[in-house]
Amino acid sequence: MAFPKVADARKLNDEELGQEIVNAKKKLFQLRLEQTTGRLETPHQFKHTKRWIAQLMTVQGERQRGAANTTQA
């Protein structure tokens, strides 16, 4: 599985972006649960999921700062 791109995150609207963050955090929780129970077969998914969450949150932060800047101007 290839890494998701930041461009993919930027294509999402605000509502989809928030939902995607929630889904990715749930996936990370499931991976941790599988690791604890010894059923984790793909440990590289931690890296993929954490990176995807970081990208999503970066885009969300950019949009919030952009909205704050337009409000102040």
Image: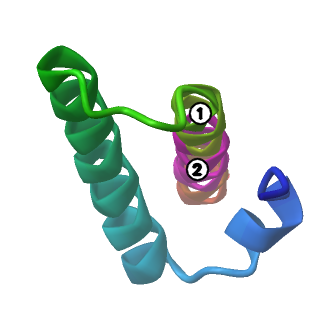
In the image, the segment drawn in magenta is 53-64
Magenta span: predominant SS is: helix
Q: Is residue 36 above or below residue 10?
A: above
Tell me residue 10's x, y (percent).
75, 68
Question: Residue 67, image x and y in percent?
Answer: 57, 58
Disc 2 on helix, strand or loop? helix
In the picture, the disc for residue 73 is none
Residue sitting at x 66%, y 50%: 59
Residue 59 forms part of the magenta stretch = yes
Question: Mark number for residue 54?
Answer: 1
Determine whether, in the image, residue 18 is placed left or right of residue 29.
right
- Going 28% across and 22% down the picture, which residue do you hit? 35
Q: Which residue is mark 2?
A: 56
* Left/right of residue 41 with respect to residue 69 in the rendered view: left
Amino acid at pointer 2: Leu
For image coordinates 85% across by 57% down, the residue present is 5
Kind of residue at badge 1: Ala
Is 71 placed left or right of 30 in the picture? right
- Residue 44 drawn at (x, y percent): 63, 29
Closest to the observer: 6 or 51? 51
Q: Residue 52: x percent and y percent?
A: 62, 45
Q: CA distance from mark 2 to mark 1?
A: 5 Å
Indicate the quadrant containing the N terminus: top left, top right, bottom left or bottom right: bottom right
Confirm or deny contact between disc 2 and disc 1 (CB under 8 A).
yes
Q: Relative to 3, is 50 above or below?
A: above
Q: Determine crowd level at label 1: few under 14, some 14-19, many 20+ residues with C-alpha closer than 10 A.
A: few
Q: Quadrant of residue 37?
A: top left
32 inside magenta stretch: no
Residue 11 occupies which quadrant of the picture? bottom right
Q: Secondary structure at mark 1?
A: helix
Q: Answer few, some or many: residues within 10 Å of disc 2's Cα (few below 14, many 20 plus, some between 14 and 19).
A: many
Horizontally, is 1 left or right of 63 in the view? right
